[in-house]
Image: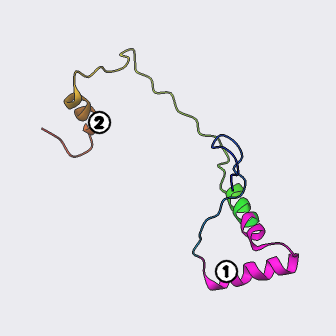
Amino acid sequence: MYTGSIYGNLGAVKTTLDISKETLRQVKSVAAREGVPMREVFERGMRAYIAGTVPSKPFRLRTIPTKGQGLVKPRDWADIRELIYAGQGGDRE
């Protein structure tokens, strides 16, 4: 069954999860008690978990002053490697 394009809403997607027997028992119990399919219980739980993991502050890239020297322009890949590993304790010679 076609559920949409890669650019739009894909609808339901099937997947396989490994969960403990106890968790499955609890999901079945909640689903039966509320009269909803198990997939609804799983989706509610995943949405609640995801909502709780959203960072409180958005990421902000800090400004690094160059003190008037601007960007370093390495001549070749060896120079780039030296710049990357400089001060990392693994002096490359």
Q: CA distance from mark 2 to mark 1?
A: 47 Å
Q: Mark 2 or mark 1, which has the lower sequence index?
A: 1
Q: Residue at x 38, y 17 (%)?
A: 70
Question: From this viewpoint, which residue is outermost toward the front?
Answer: 1
Q: Residue at x 59, y 71 (%)?
A: 17
Can you identify the residue that label 1 sits on? 23
Amino acid type, callout 1? Thr
Please say whether residue 22 is one of the residues in the magenta stretch: yes
Amino acid type, callout 2? Ile
Most common secondary structure along the magenta stretch: helix
Residues under numbered marks 2 and 1 in contact, where contact means CB atoms less than 8 Å apart: no
Q: Residue at x 72, y 53 (%)?
A: 11
Q: Quadrant of residue 77?
A: top left
Neighbor class of circle 1 (other Cα within 10 Å; few <14, some 14-19, many 20+) is few
Q: Quadrant of residue 14?
A: bottom right
Quadrant showing the C terminus: top left
Vertical position of residue 78 compared to residue 57: above or below: above
Q: Residue at x 75, y 73 (%)?
A: 38
Vertical position of residue 59 compared to residue 1: above or below: above
Quadrant showing the N terminus: bottom right
Can you identify the residue that label 2 sits on? 84
> Which of the pair 22/8 is nearer the observer?
8
Vertical position of residue 75 compared to residue 19: above or below: above
Question: From this viewpoint, which residue is outermost toward the left?
Answer: 93
Q: Quadrant of residue 44?
A: bottom right
Q: Is 59 on the left-hand or right-hand side of 40?
A: left
| Badge 2 element | helix
Q: Magenta residues, as a range? A: 19-43
Please say whether residue 36 is one of the residues in the magenta stretch: yes
Q: Tell me the number on the disc at residue 13.
A: none
Question: From this viewpoint, which residue is outermost toward the top?
Answer: 68
Neighbor class of circle 2 (other Cα within 10 Å; few <14, some 14-19, many 20+) is few
